[in-house]
Every structure is written in C-alpha cells, then in structure tokens.
Amino acid sequence: MSLTGTWDTSVLQSKLGSLKDALQVDGRLIVEDETARLSRALCNVAAPWQPGGGNLERLGIRSVEREIQNLASEAKPELISEVAAKWGLKDINGCVTGTDHVKLPLEWANLDTSGQDLPTLHQRYRDWKGKVPLVPSPLGHWKSRVVVPAGTRAAYLERRRQHVGRWKASWGYAAYRLGSTRFNQWIKRHFMLLGSYAVFRPEGLRDPVRPSITFGSRVAGNYRSDFHNRVQFTVKARVRAIARRIEKAAQGYQADLATQMKTQAQARKSHEPEEIIR
C-alpha cells in the first residue's frame, strides 16, 4: 500500500507483511482490507474537520462563506458606475460621500462590474494551501480585494458550498472503489466527479508476491501542515491497529480473523456494516 504525498508508510507496509504471515491468507485480501480502512480514516481527518467532530458539513459551509465574504464586497450598481467612471477597475484609491454626507475612503483592488470575474479572482487570491487569507477591513475605511454588484456574490457562494466534502471524498475514494458505501451524501456526491483530484491505482494487486494499491488526493490543502500531522497520526494509528490484529493471530485466532476478513470483504461488495462517515 502507498499514498500519494510525502508521508512515510514504510512501517505500515512492513506491518502489512507481518499481518499476512500471521493470518496466512491471500495478501491481496490484506491490502484491500487495510487500504479501505486507511482510506476511510484519512477521509475522516480531511477538512472540514475539528476535534470532537460535530456538524462537519455545516463547518465547511461556514468556512466557505467566511472566505468569500471576506474576499468580495458588494456595492450598489450606481456606486459601481460612479467609481468605475472616476478611477477605473483596478487599484482604486478614492473617497465617496454617502447619503449621510460622510466621506468614505475606498481602497478596492479589483472592481468587477458584472460579477462574472469573481471565480477567476477567487483563484488568483488563493495561496499555495488553497486558502484565501482573511484580511481585516479597518473601521470607516472600505478596503476590499474584490467588489461586485449587489446580489451577484450569492450565486457564486452557492456554487462554492457545493464543493464542501470534495477533499474528504478525494481521500475516501479508495474505500468507495473497494466497496465501502456508508458515506454521508455531502461526501458521497463527489465520488463520480472527482476526476484528477483522487488517485486510485489498484494495478499492484496483480503482483502475487507484493500486492499493493496506490491511492491519494491531489487537493491543494494536502500540503497544509496541520493536515500533514493528522495524516501521520492516522497512519501510526493504523500501524498500532495492525499490531493488535497480529497479536490476536499469534494467540490462536488466525482462523477466526481470516474468516472475519473474508466476510468483511464480501460485505464491502454489498452493504458494508460500518460506521457512517459524517
């Protein structure tokens, strides 16, 4: 088994070999079973994530809303027309007078007069981690990286809300391909649309000596240090779990565990009785 990325799985792979020897079953069954378990575990720790769980879908939606609302402000069409006529569409530094006769300084980096450029501008402001850094707006000073006409931001927000769960799905995809079905709908809806975001290469199962599956995710957030640490913790947890399975086998439960594994493999092909990933 291997993952795309920079995580060290050598200990995990060594444990898989030991588990195969302890259970005395087809190594391909071991690899499929443990790949599905690890895939689901990594799906659990991909964002949206928080200690203790909770409503993770709602957490992801709030994160999207906060990012877009911080990036893009809305202005009335008449104000947009006035500002565009005076200062153009880029790097606007000016001052307008409101209906209360109070002057308001403007510092707008981009004025999108139709709202059609918001997706492109959103991508431009993303950092290498796939996030748009939050920028405070000083009191009494309208500072914004993007300004769009009132009402146009909501449509883009709704499109972005539909992306919530895609990162989790990219890591859970291997388990899905191996027969796991009990994912919540906000994650499951992405499985058929992931494209290059997910990696699943089971060709290594053809090797009778060292069967393997390569799986992973190409979502930008994989490079975040907090997620990197959660992956390392998850891989180590699987190593400990495999060690416990080896210990049970050494105590004389080889036949029971082998039968259980084969049963679970069949269950994943139909209706797997496992915890729903929320």
Image (tube, rainbow, N blue to C red):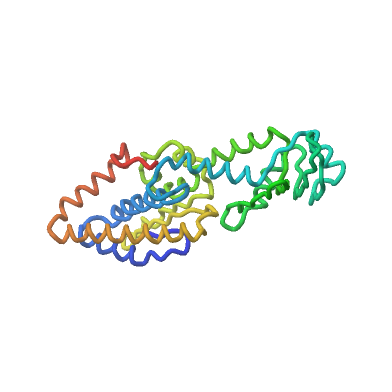
> Measured from the top left, where is residue 206 in percent x and y?
36, 56
Front position in the image: 275 or 109:
109
Rendering coords of residue 238 (x, y %): 32, 57
Q: Name the residue rendered at 79%, 37% in the picture.
A: 98
Relative depth, front residue between 6 and 263: 6
Name the image quarter holding residue 3. Answer: bottom left
Does 250 sit left or right of 113 as displayed? left
Q: Residue at x 36, y 39 (%)?
A: 182
Most extreme residue toward the right, as rendered?
A: 86
Task: Give 214 or 40, whichever is nearer the viewer.
Answer: 40
248 left or right of 75 in image: left
- Residue for point 39% across, 56% down: 213
Does 261 sit left or right of 43 as displayed?
Answer: left
Q: Residue 114 appears at what percent x and percent y? A: 75, 37
- Locate the N terminus and report the quarter of the image it occupies: bottom left
Q: Residue at x 68, y 50 (%)?
A: 138
* Residue 265 location (% of width, % of height): 28, 45
Which residue extends farthest left?
A: 252
Looking at the image, is 220 positioned above or below residue 147? Answer: below
Residue 89 relative to residue 4: left or right = right
Q: Indicate the quadrant containing the C terminus: top left, top right, bottom left or bottom right.
A: top left
